[in-house]
């Protein structure tokens, strides 16, 4: 149903693909430069693609009145928002992960590192959805994409910096501090996001 | 076994008898502004309360306050003899609602929209196609429907969610004459089942209720400025 409801998912997916390819082309094939900036390219394009979809998830349902009915139901709003964020991650970030091997070829990333890189993005990317939905709920009264973007980006810094650091250092030990911090960052946002999001929605109504 | 069935029947009747809502000296506010003050009314089972008044008087605000979508600073709301004033979460679970927004997804068909809410509320398996037949709704994508058809879809959801107390905010808007008749029919059927309907409308005669509340009587007096 989610897939049917949004052309924004196609836009995000297409954006991710072309942004990454253009990123690779912009270095004119200079391998040294590409090796340096490729991980940043993957993370930045993933981040912007997720940002493109944020305005559609919570705001659309608030505007058509569905949120009123979520509040009427026996389900805790926290669980509803948690599930919505999981669906957002599955429909937005997961397809991008699937085409990431092809993007990595374009970015001339060593294919031996493929599995490690995918695991790093897999660990870090849920944080983007959970932070995004949280900010989306906090800005419920204002349907401005500009506002969501400007508030969300600073909250993406920890994920972005840790993600880029881990992607740049794939030869680190599996249990190195950077990997653990990236995992903890995701775990932290997954834990707090549904509660803050639900509180923000309820606060908006009161 | 027979005793058990009898007990269950007695419990069901008792439960139905209990259906009541009592609004006591309720003040309705939006932000810091008091829209209505000291609203009082009570409804027992099988009652239809019609709320009327000019545009902007606070009909929707009152219903949203009862529903728990707006805060209560003064007054009380009692449902089935239990005070729910400070417990909007539990209060919401007792009520069913139709507002100005239809809460429907434009990308889904009418059937899909109704099935979505049926699954979401895990309500009794009402046959959706029968409901659509009743309202004369075709199974088309909602984005291609007229405003009247969207309203009928939202009204069909009332029967899906069920619950004893219905809050209907201008339910007849955008409906054709046949749609209005069907609306009155479902409200009457709900009344026969022992349910309570609180309806805000500009056409109080439609529901032929003796319990009409004119909200102008509860609006704070406005200052008159001489220009």
Image: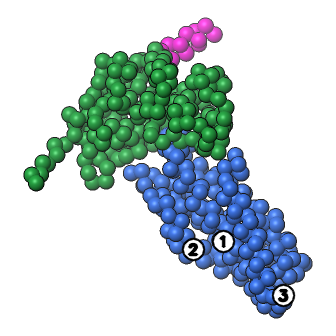
Chain colours: A blue, B green
Image coords of residue A64 (percent x, y)? 52, 46
Residue B5: in magenta span: yes
Q: In which quadrant of the rendered view does residue A127 lie?
A: bottom right
**Residue A107 appears in view:** yes
Chain of the residue on which disc 1 is drawn:
A
Q: In which quadrant of the rendered view does residue A163 lie?
A: bottom right
Residue A29: assigned label: 3
Mark 3 or 2, closer to the camera: 3
Marks 2 and 1 share the same chain:
yes
Q: Secondary structure at mark 2?
A: helix
Q: Are marks 2 and 1 in contact (CB under 8 Å)?
A: yes
Q: In which quadrant of the rendered view does residue A85 lie?
A: bottom right
Residue A153: assigned label: 2
The region drawn magenta spans B1-16
| Quarter in which the C terminus of chain B is drawn | bottom left
Judging by the rendered image, the residue that carries numbered circle 1 is A47
CA separation, marks 1 and 3? 24 Å
Identify the residue at horizontal 39%, vertical 41% (top origin). B64
Identify the residue at horizontal 65%, vertical 29% (top origin). B138
CA separation, marks 3 and 2? 29 Å
Image coords of residue B89 (percent x, y)? 45, 42
Chain of the residue on which disc 2 is drawn:
A
Residue A150: in magenta span: no
Apparent side of residue B44 relative to residue A97 in the rendered image (left or right): left
In the image, residue A178 sits, relative to residue B53, either above or below, namely below
In the image, residue A25 sits, relative to residue A118, either above or below, namely below
Taking depth in this image into account, of B97 and B203 the one nearest to the observer is: B203
């Amino acid at each position: 149903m989610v897939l049917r409801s949004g052309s924004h998912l196609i836009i995000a997916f297409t954006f991710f693909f072309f942004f990454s390819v253009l990123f690779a082309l912009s270095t004119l094939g200079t391998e040294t430069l590409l090796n340096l900036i490729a991980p940043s390219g993957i993370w930045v394009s993933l981040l912007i693609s997720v940002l493109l979809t944020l305005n559609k998830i919570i705001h659309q349902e608030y505007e058509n009145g569905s949120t009123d009915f979520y509040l009427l139901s026996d389900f805790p709003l926290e669980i509803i928002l948690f599930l919505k964020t999981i669906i957002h991650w599955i429909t937005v970030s997961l397809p991008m992960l699937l085409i990431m091997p092809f993007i990595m070829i374009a970015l001339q990333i060593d294919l031996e590192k493929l599995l490690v890189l995918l695991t790093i993005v897999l660990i870090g990317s849920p944080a983007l959805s959970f932070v995004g939905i949280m900010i989306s709920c906090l800005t419920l009264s204002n349907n401005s994409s500009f506002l969501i973007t400007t508030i969300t980006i600073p909250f993406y810094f920890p994920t972005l910096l840790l993600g880029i650091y881990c992607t740049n250092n794939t030869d680190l030990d599996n249990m190195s501090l950077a990997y653990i911090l990236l995992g903890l960052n995701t775990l932290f946002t997954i834990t707090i996001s549904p509660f803050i999001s639900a509180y923000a929605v309820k606060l908006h109504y009161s | 076994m027979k005793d058990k069935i009898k007990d269950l029947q007695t419990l069901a009747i008792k439960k139905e008898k209990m259906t009541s809502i009592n609004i006591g000296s309720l003040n309705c506010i939006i932000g810091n502004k008091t829209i209505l003050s000291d609203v009082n009314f009570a409804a027992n089972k099988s009652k239809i309360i019609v709320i009327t008044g000019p545009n902007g008087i606070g009909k929707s605000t009152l219903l949203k306050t009862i529903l728990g979508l707006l805060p209560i600073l003064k007054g009380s709301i009692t449902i089935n003899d239990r005070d729910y004033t400070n417990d909007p979460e539990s209060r919401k679970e007792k009520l069913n609602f139709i507002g100005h927004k239809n809460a429907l997804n434009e990308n889904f068909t009418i059937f899909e929209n109704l099935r979505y809410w049926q699954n979401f509320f895990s309500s009794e398996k009402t046959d959706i196609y029968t409901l659509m037949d009743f309202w004369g709704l075709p199974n088309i994508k909602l984005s291609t429907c007229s405003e009247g058809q969207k309203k009928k879809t939202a009204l069909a959801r009332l029967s899906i969610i069920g619950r004893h107390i219905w809050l209907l905010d201008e339910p007849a808007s955008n409906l054709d004459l046949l749609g209005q008749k069907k609306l009155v029919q479902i409200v009457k059927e709900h009344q026969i089942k022992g349910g309570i309907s609180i309806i805000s409308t500009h056409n109080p005669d439609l529901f032929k209720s003796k319990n009409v509340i004119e909200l102008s009587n509860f609006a704070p007096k406005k200052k008159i400025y001489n220009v």
